[in-house]
Amino acid sequence: MNLSEQLNYYSKSIGFSFKELSEASGISTGTISNYRAGKQIPKMNNPKLSMLAKAIVELGRKKDLTFYYDDVLLELQKSVSGNIEVSFDIYISNLNKLLKTLNISNIELARKLNYDPSQISRFLSGERLPSDIGKFSSQIASFIANNYSDSCYCSLLQELFECGKDETDSPTKIHKKIIEWLGSNTDTTEENPINSFLDNLDKFDLNDFIGAINFNNIKVPSVPFELPTTNYYHGLEEFKQAEFDFMKASALSKSRADVIMYSDMPIAEMARDENFAKKYMYGMAILLKKNLHISFIHDVHRSFEEMLLGLEGNIPMYMTGQISPYYFPEPQSRVFSHLLKVSGTAAMCGFAVTGDHKDGLYLVTKNKTEVQKYRTAAEMMLKSARPLMDIYRGDRKAKFADHLHSMWKAGSRRMIFSSLPIFTISEELLLKILHRANISDESTNEILSFRADYHTAMTELLKKYSISVEISSLSKEKFDESRVSLELSQLFYDNSIAYNYDEYTEHLQQTFDFAESFNNCTVKVENEPTFKNISFSIIEDKCVIVSKANDPAIHFVIHHPKMVRAFENFVPLIKG
């Protein structure tokens, strides 16, 4: 069936009018009418198909009819599978015009997008096409939006796109216009897993999590745990039990030795079991309750999406400050999958032929000789691993300060703030805010000193490098709906110090004034902040510093090149 026939089928099966479908989906009646008449056919990954599928499922539910979203979406996608919305000749022509307008070389584009230069050359000549045009378009749009949004480039883009200033006055708008110009009609920004990772981190509250798992009432078991010296496990269900047995044995031991964990085993099958996931998280919580430090070596050679999903799942653990994540820079053998976890008195080891996890073999042992051998191997692995990220909480304040000061000395950077940058505020305004908020003399002196150091460092940095600052400019109404506070997360300051609106607007103006005093400092403004509780700095080709202001204050310094590049291509989702 084509799309028209498929929509008619659902309309008759469920008994809804197309006006009702329009209201439920949010798609205009004119567009739906064009779909029915065959005058307009969306591409397979057009978001409107997802909107239609959700609406059809909801309309069915109201009539006590069960339709599953995945099934409906698949049928809609199949009905348009032969449609192509982009002429490849026009696409390549537009892409070349865009790069020529901005004077972007093949080599620069290849480096930023992590492609081979010869591959880019073949794309631009039309000799070869990207396997995923939508993804490739979004990568280009992200790169240009984040690096070519100054006024001089915006003028060139406005002339090329034949549009007004208001359509290119922010990175998100430039990104959207580039997607439209290239003609792919596919923008994958919303699917960027970095957005999801940051959104989950922004919303995460450690206190809520502790309450949800009743962490404060967890008792580390003391009853003897009967486990054979060495036990073997076969099949997925026994593999789950092996995980629990290892954590029980580790929690019951008197040893305070660090725990080392590594696994490149597939996780999807076991993760589908919600009961297992809850028990696993509880077991990890017991190890943390015992104040054991865990070094976790991640397999980053999975797909980037899977890697970030794993990181998202570990956010609660990372927030405790008791986990240090690592990775191997080179991919391990893909003939076999492996697992090795070692505590002070227990070890868990597993292997399987890649692609055949269920027929693998796990073992858990408490034999002292065997545990020591596995521990030696795990420690050697850890020495070969690199930090995936450094995590700093208040107890590592001094070490974070040292790292921060070293990062102040070199490198162009892009800085996205949930509030306003503390280095742009005047000492007089800051002092006025601190006095109004009744901040103690000791804290006032510490905050003023930090502001002075930061201001000096950024002023010196701008003599050699560029800084892009991304902030929001809130209306009085938006400001009153939120609580905007001084950006003091890097000081691990316990209490937030909120602006009043006059203080906020004065600091906002000082931020613009600071940028205008330097040729290589730019300020990009959105109508509301991308995130409420986190800010981050991307230091070109070096690292990313993600700072969470509260619940608790914590900083993630991310080193892995793949993640750094993903942050470099990050474009905030369009608000409102």
Image: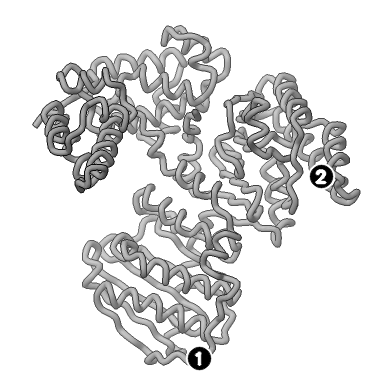
The image quarter in which residue 240 lies: bottom left
Which residue position holds label 1?
Answer: 223
Q: Is residue 446 left or right of residue 522?
A: right
Residue 475 spot, x, y in % from top left: 65, 25
The residues bearing labels 2 and 1 have C-alpha atoms spaced at a distance of 50 Å
Q: Which mark is residue 255?
A: none
Give the residue displayed 28% in from the left and 60% down from the top: 334
Residue 205 spot, x, y in % from top left: 58, 55
Crowdedness near tag 1: few (<14), some (14–19) or many (≥20) residues, C-alpha within 10 Å? few
Note whether residue 503 is visible: yes
Residue 36 spot, x, y in % from top left: 16, 22
Amino acid type indicated by mark 1: Val
Q: Nearer the viewer, mark 2 or mark 1?
A: 1
Give the residue displayed 52% in from the left and 64% down from the top: 212
Crowdedness near tag 2: few (<14), some (14–19) or many (≥20) residues, C-alpha within 10 Å? many
Note whether residue 128 is visible: no
Which residue position holds label 2?
Answer: 447
